[in-house]
Amino acid sequence: MKSSQNYAELYQHYEKHKDTIALRLKEFQQQRSEKEIFQELCFCLLAANTSSRMAMRVMDSVGDVIFTGSEEEIRDRLHSLSCRFYNKRAEYIFLARSVPLKFDRMYLAENIKGFGYKESSHFLRNIGHSGYAILDKHVLRAMLEFGVIKKIPAMHAKNYLLLEKKLENFSKKLGIRMDELDFVLWSRKGGEILK
């Protein structure tokens, strides 16, 4: 069991940032065009295994090539923007254009190349769906720190869902909604409330 000091720090962090978190979650609820939804999907493809900051920087400058360019044109543009893993990400973006979108996490994880449960959850959260955990390294380490888990297991669909359930139970214990808790745990280590 973790000390009351750790929990006090967590609650203080939540209180300090809860208005910003609420605003960010409200932004995600806004109606979006198909183009904006696809841009969000691309953002999540770019953020996987890197950072939201890098993905935002690239998305701010990538332009319409993600909608109309060939895979090679997308790759060249990503490379010119110093995007990590630009070869794979260009492939994923190009292929994603031909996948009919359904707002179902399992469907996205199975049909969008480059998406697993984490990326699918990130995408769904960012377009206004709630109740999904984005189990990145910061959140998993916080779960370990607070004794929610004993070790960080290999991440596959079954473990992801089990860990998400544990985070949901921790959320209820704390009295902080899971969508907010994700931001609280992430921002304690990442320092910012991004997307």
Image: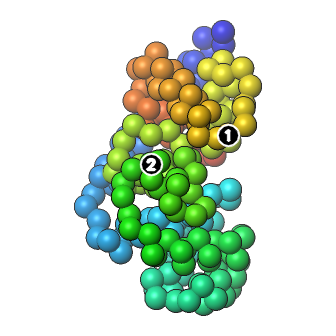
| Residue, far left | 31
The residue depicted at 60 percent of the width and 85 percent of the height is 71
Residue 174 in view, yes or no:
no
Q: Residues within 10 Å of mark 2 (few under 14, many from 20)?
A: many
Residue 72 in view, yes or no:
yes
Q: Is residue 116 left or right of residue 76?
A: left
The residue depicted at 68 percent of the width and 56 percent of the height is 49
- Compared with 120, 21 (above or below) is above
Q: Secondary structure at mark 2?
A: helix
Instruction: Give x and y (percent) for residue 88.
Output: 68, 72
82 or 187, which lies in front?
82
Color theme of the render: rainbow
- Cα separation between marks 2 and 1: 16 Å
Instruction: Give x and y (percent) for residue 171.
Output: 46, 24
Q: Tell me if label 2 and label 1 are in contact, CB under 8 Å.
A: no
Instruction: Give x and y (percent) for residue 4.
Output: 60, 11
Type of amino acid at the residue the image marks with label 2: Arg
Q: Quadrant of the N terminus?
A: top right
Type of amino acid at the residue the image marks with label 1: Met
Label for residue 155? Answer: 1
92 or 195, which lies in front?
92
Mark 2 lies on residue: 105
Q: Earlier in the sequence, mark 2 or mark 1?
A: 2
Q: Is residue 111 left or right of residue 84?
A: left
Instruction: Give x and y (percent) for residue 158.
Output: 59, 34
The residue depicted at 65 percent of the width and 83 percent of the height is 75
9 or 117, which lies in front?
117
Q: Secondary structure at mark 1?
A: loop
- Compared with 145, 192 (above or below) is below
